[in-house]
Amino acid sequence: MAEQKPQGAKVLLVDDDASLLKLLAIRIESKGYEVTTCESGITALQILKNQVFDAVITDLRMDEMDGMTLHRQLQSRYPALPVIMMTAHGSIPDAVEATKQGIFAFITKPVDKDELFDSLAKAIEIHGVNADEVIPKSNIVTRSGAMLHLLEQVKLLGPTQVNVLISGASGTGKELLAQAIHQHSHVSEGPFVAINCGAVPGELLESELFGHKKGSFTGAVKDHQGLFQQAQGGTLFLDEIGDMPLNLQVKLLRVLQEKTIRPVGFQEEIPIDVRIVSATHKNLPDAILNQQFREDLYYRLNVVNLKLPPLYERREDISLLAQHFSASIAKRMNQSEKRFASDAMHALVRFDWPGNIRQLQNVVEQVVALTPSEVISEHLVLAALNSNEKNVEPLSLNDAKKEFERDYVINTLKMAGGNVAEGAKLAKRNRSDFYKLIKKHNIDVDNL
């Protein structure tokens, strides 16, 4: 991963030594950061009410409010904001305590500029620029520009009646995005019901979706209300819709057209009022060509397509998600939260996460369980990543070719500055063929 560039990154510098404050500000600005200075922790908190910063550098020993007190205030109000602590009274106990409290880096005075710049660059690389992690009406934790753009689309789509198809690799959070659509919709007060179509045997899926009448088949010992009826007045989320058997696809298409269902063994139709959101990790256009998915159903479901990026394309979210999972574990276990050492977090951010958010959550669960202290070490994280990498199922040759082709087209377009004609020249393909590749991989040229 390329190092996070400082341009646009905003730093708040806090020190009650006015001359040192001025000198440090000049040094940091020379590296391309935007610096705001103040001489007390109280003033820093006032400034933060009206401005967003990407890192705070503060002295430890200050009158009125010392650096650790300021950090505790920042931790409760802005938990993703990295803090670099300086002190002229550096000692091992101070450094250990600072690390336990979640300080990103601990630097002694006189400040070594290389050490300061290195710590600041890592803080920005790990935590991103201008973080915005609070997403109203959503359980999604993000500061990624691509994800925030996606959530803006969700806000617009929520109140409409259109069917939405969410595409993305396994573990990217498709159900959370479906919940966000529901929470922004006119049926948000109704139920949200989810089913993984690939996890239910085909012969049982019809009964699960539409329900059945007692005695309609062997084992039907009582009437069963299907998920469509359970989701009445709300949203039904059909996850992994690409795994639905063809015979059921025909029946689902009829439900979408007629707005009625017929439970197994029933003669009469039952009207339904349900918002449909579906999701898949498969390439449905390819499945249509292979006669594994109905084209007419695809167009019914895919009125609007939302594509979730893999975690390696939203690295600025990795530290935020890791902290979120650690805090959730602490709350669940009724114990104090364990924090990642800066080099441990750096290792997480550098990893490519083929299993996406689900894999990250599993790794956090593992290292939290195995960490005897309050701080999770780099060594433990690297061991967990090595173990996980061995357990990740390798891509099939076809999927690997598709992934390479998509990455190649995206990188070529980026090199061409988003110009499709120029990208076609770089790829030594005619423009028509290059357009087909862009369409095939659902690449949004405007948002590269």
Image (cartoon, rainbow, N blue to C red):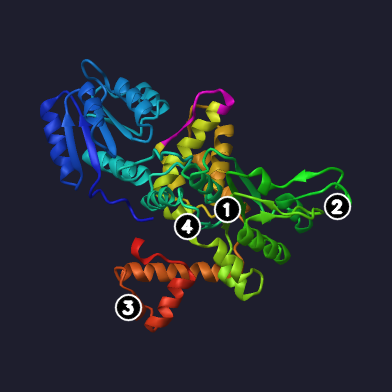
Q: Amino acid at mark 3?
A: Ala
Residue hosting label 3: 421
Q: On the image, numbered disc 1 is attached to which residue? A: 276
Q: Would you name the residue on which mark 2 appears?
A: 216
Is 59 on the left or on the right of 128, as rendered?
A: left
Q: Earlier in the sequence, mark 4 or mark 2?
A: 2
Q: State the image quarter where residue 299 is shown.
A: bottom right
Sooner in the amino-acid sequence: mark 4 or mark 1: 1
Q: Is residue 102 above or below residue 318?
A: above
State the SS at label 3.
helix
Q: Nearer the viewer, mark 4 or mark 1?
A: 1
Amino acid beneath label 2: Ser
User: Visible in this render: residue 376?
Assistant: yes
**C-alpha distance separating marks 4 and 1:** 14 Å
Q: Is residue 335 magenta?
A: yes
**Residue pointed to by mark 4:** 306
Classify mark 4: residues with Cα within 10 Å, few (<14), some (14-19) or many (20+). Answer: some
